Image: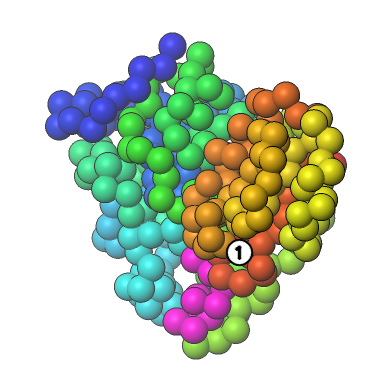
């Protein structure tokens, strides 16, 4: 049974030791909680796949404490420095050519590796203490909604792991943006996330190829990016326009509505009207998304209809998660 460990010097030491001995630790990050193993310990990394029910063709992201440790696992190119300077530590994952030190298990046999330097202060302490890169996917049973609190991790994986490090609710609330930087001349976004494509494009001085809706081709660049993901057990429907007052008033008791912002007309709130943000902030909405999707999944409602966010900034990443959560296959 998992024990949640508060961030004390003693516990950081304990968990760093556990990682060095090949055990798994669920860790907080600014995006979502991850299930971490010493990236250089293949047996430990294998446990991640087993515990999450994750297919071996879905590679793991390596979390590093510094740019120096990047050289242990990946080949740098001229674009790395600029992105690292602006966005690391933070919610940006880069795909780079891998070095031999990284096992095929971690990269699912690809010759590239996903890396990021996370910004969460508690995870950074742990990374410094364990002195190895940590391989960590989001800490959820494969395909389910990512965890943004330690309680979410406990609920999904608590009977399969021993250690959870407490880091409070995740500030960003959706996963990192993944940029394929194998060819620095033509970077592309593989997964929208915590850093918007607008911000990335302006820093890189070029327009990044917009992320395509995920397709499973014979040899996908990012094998884990399935169109059906973040899947609640209950039905989720999407709409692109806000609910109006009459629609909310007519809502069946069995159904739930998930608005992008708090409906401003006084409504007889029957407990089945939810909102992602008070005043329409996409950042706040992203922060709340996975918690509210879980709450809806656990509640008595048969199905939920969710409004899509305006398609700019982090709103695009939020919509990406909603679309995958609503996908049937
Ligand atoms: O914010 C995040 O990125 C969180 C936190 C814990 O860091 N992690 C996360 O990991 O979202 P995960 O495993 O749930 O998603 C990682 C994605 C997968 O879709 C995987 O296919 C892709 O990264 N990926 C990993 N290595 C790759 C590679 N070499 N080439 C392309 N895609 C890769
Ligand atoms: Mg995941």
Query: Residue at left 32%, top 73%?
Result: 85
- Image quadrant containing the C terminus: top right
The residue labelled by disc 1 is 315
Q: Residues within 10 Å of mark 1 (few under 14, many from 20)?
A: many
* Residue 97, above or below 247: below
Report whether 193 appears left or right of 311: left
**Which residue in the rendered view is the most extreme toward the bottom?**
205
In the displayed structure, does residue 203 sit left or right of residue 254?
A: left
- Magenta stretch: give its range: 194-204
Q: Residue at (33%, 54%) from the top-left corner?
A: 119
- Determine whether the beta carbon of the residue marked 1 sits less than 8 angstroms from the nearest atom of ligand 1: no
Which of the colour schemes (rainbow, by chain, secondary structure, one colour) is used?
rainbow
Q: Residue at x 33, y 38 (%)?
A: 167
Magenta: main secondary structure: helix
Where's residue 236, x and y in %?
78, 41
Magenta run includes residue 201? yes
Drawn side of residue 178 relative to residue 9, left or right: right
Q: Quadrant of residue 239?
A: bottom right
83, above or below 97, in the image: below
Q: Quadrant of the N terminus?
A: top left
Residue at x 81%, y 30% (from the top left corner): 254
């Amino acid at each position: 049974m998992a024990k949640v460990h508060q961030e004390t010097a003693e516990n950081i030491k304990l968990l760093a030791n556990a990682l060095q001995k090949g055990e798994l630790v669920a860790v907080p990050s600014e995006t979502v909680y991850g299930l971490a193993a010493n990236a250089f310990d293949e047996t430990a990394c294998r446990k991640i796949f087993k515990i999450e029910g994750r297919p071996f063709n879905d590679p793991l992201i390596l979390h590093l404490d510094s740019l120096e440790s990047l050289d242990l696992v990946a080949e740098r190119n001229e674009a790395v420095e600029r992105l690292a300077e602006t966005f690391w530590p933070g919610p940006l994952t880069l795909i780079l050519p891998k070095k031999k030190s990284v096992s095929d298990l971690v990269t699912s046999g690809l010759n590239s590796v996903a890396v990021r330097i996370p910004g969460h202060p508690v995870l950074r302490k742990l990374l410094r203490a364990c002195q190895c890169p940590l391989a960590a996917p989001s800490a959820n049973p494969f395909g389910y909604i990512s965890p943004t609190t330690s309680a979410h991790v406990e609920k999904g994986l608590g009977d399969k792991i021993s250690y959870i490090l407490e880091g409070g609710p995740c500030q960003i609330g959706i996963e990192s943006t993944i940029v394929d930087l194998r060819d620095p001349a033509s970077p592309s976004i593989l997964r929208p996330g915590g850093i918007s494509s607008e911000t990335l494009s302006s820093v890189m001085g070029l327009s990044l190829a917009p992320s395509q809706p995920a397709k499973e081709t014979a040899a996908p660049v990012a094998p884990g990016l399935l169109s059906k993901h973040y899947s609640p057990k209950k039905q989720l429907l999407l709409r692109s326009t806000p609910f109006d007052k009459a629609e909310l008033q007519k809502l069946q008791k069995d159904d739930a509505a998930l608005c992008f912002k708090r409906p401003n007309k006084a409504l007889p709130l029957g407990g089945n009207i939810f909102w992602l943000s008070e005043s329409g902030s996409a950042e706040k909405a992203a922060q709340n998304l996975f918690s509210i999707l879980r709450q809806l999944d656990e509640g008595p409602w048969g199905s939920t209809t969710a409004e899509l966010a305006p398609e700019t900034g982090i709103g695009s990443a939020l919509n990406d998660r909603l679309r995958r959560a609503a996908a049937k296959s």
